[in-house]
Image (cartoon, coloured by chain):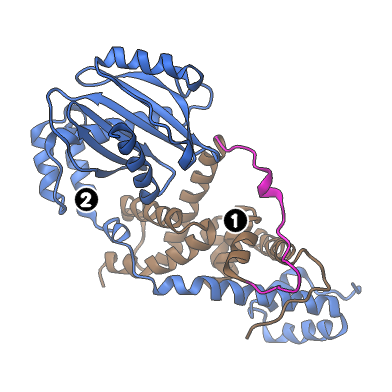
Chain colours: A blue, B brown
Amino acid sequence: MSDTRIPEADLQAYIDGRLAAARRGEVEVELAADSTLAEQVAAYRTQNDALRAAFHPVLDEPIPDRLLDATRPSRRRAWAIAAALGWIVLGGVAGWSINEAYRPAPSPPRVDVPLAQRAAIAHAVYSPEVRHPVEVGADQEAHLVAWLSKRLGAPVRAPKLESIGYRLVGGRLLPGESGPVAHFMYQSEKGGRVTLYVRTEGSDHGETAFRYADEGKVRVFYWIDRTLGYALSSADISREQLYTLANAVYRQLNP
Amino acid sequence: MTERDQVVALIPRLRRYARALVGEPGAADDLVQDTLERSLGKFHLWKPGTDLRAWLFTIMHNVHVNQVRRRREFAVLNDEALEIPVPDGQDAALTLRDLQRGLEHLPTDQLEVLLLVVLEDMSYQEVATALGVPIGTVMSRLSRARGKLRVAMDGGAASTRLQIVK
């Protein structure tokens, strides 16, 4: 590099076509004399072109519905009203009907609603735990499953999800609205966590379809299978990935 | 055009930026969704007549920084992330995957500057305002981002000169 080397900021501005005309000449003189520098400028301009070429097509993609939904204030207002009525705490009928009035999509039966919320809260509380994510570790899986089954008064199982990249970390017992809840935690190699929330339902509800809920940052797939309610939650994988996991869980519980 | 229409009109640009910033399309849209929800919650703070785009990008920056910070709390040390990919043989074509892999090697603060300048065509002053840093910091991050991306993409070998696609 020669002593007359142009300031780095000028060089960057030259690359971006943002340098004042008067200074451009100086840069070009310098580039003509310094092939290494000229090569660098060419490489950086190639970078610019490659970046634009690679990501420009995103502009033409259709906007996903969930992003359009996120710009609609009514949904948030519904949440605010519902929360103000203590709906989240009480799970009351009044709050639900208000929420339902705002919700365009067909809604799950009322009995399901607190399940997704409860599961999301449990997920949000325990999944960031570094030192104490579970009460009983996966190394004592047999004990864990026996213990939770005994407390719930129903046979509970921890599905195996290693084949799709999630290993069991362990589980814990949680207080639910109508009794104990079994909570299993799984973790991927990259540290992403999903939790399975299992609670007993008061009576036999038969089987419900998978339902999906966005609870703040936590995504939840939940379903009821006779007397047990299940909810699989995650804050760090996509809805599609979570759906794959939920399917795997369901298949293992209903072989 | 209502305020909502203005926001919706900017969604494709937010998605393009997020895609380049995050990589995985689902996660990128998650970032956009979080940004939109956050912006709606504080829309009363936006002054009509000021640059809505800059305001949204500032929110996205804040959301992303928080997410990265939280993710780091239980991130597992990953040696793979330190490897620099070397293009095989003669093939120095800038494929999307190579480019994305290259971008993954940039620290977030440098990557943000590069993307706002190149993809969003923001002026350096606009970038400085959006990210809340002095313009000198913008310039030095830009310079470092380009240098690092070049090394990540072609191994830094000055001999393997890249072709200019025009």
Closer to us: mark 2 or mark 1?
2
The mark found on residue B73 in the picture is none
Q: Where is residue A163 in the image (x, y as percent from the top left)?
A: 47, 40
The residue closer to the viewer here, A104 or B42, is A104
Say which chain tag 2 marks: A
Please tell me in which quadrant of the rendered image residue B56 appears. Answer: bottom left
Highlighted magenta segment, given as a residue range: B74-94
Q: Would residue B104 appear left or right of B88 to someone viewing this image?
A: left
Circle 1 packing at 10 Å, graded few (<14), some (14-19), many (20+), is: few
Q: Where is residue B9 in the image (x, y as percent from the top left)?
A: 34, 70
Residue A247 lies, with reference to residue A121, above or below; the image says below
Q: Position of residue B48 (x, y in %)?
A: 34, 65
- Magenta-drawn stretch contains B93: yes
Residue at 23 percent across and 32 percent down: it is A115
Residue pointed to by mark 2: A75
Q: Would residue A50 appear left or right of A180 to someone viewing this image?
A: right
Please tell me in which quadrant of the rendered image residue B117 appears. Answer: bottom right
Q: Which residue is farthest right?
A: A2
Q: What element carries label 1?
A: loop
Inspect the image, locate mark 1, and give the three-letter code of the amino acid beneath it. Val
Q: Disc 2 versus disc 1: distance between alpha carbons? A: 35 Å
Circle 2 packing at 10 Å, graded few (<14), some (14-19), many (20+), is: some
Residue at 16 percent across and 50 percent down: it is A103
Residues behind callouts 2 and 1 on a single chain? no
Q: Is mark 2 on a helix, strand or loop?
A: helix
The mark found on residue B133 in the picture is 1
Which quadrant is home to the C terminus of chain B?
Answer: bottom right
Inspect the image, locate mark 2, and give the three-letter code of the amino acid beneath it. Arg
Q: Answer yes or no: is residue A127 visible.
A: no
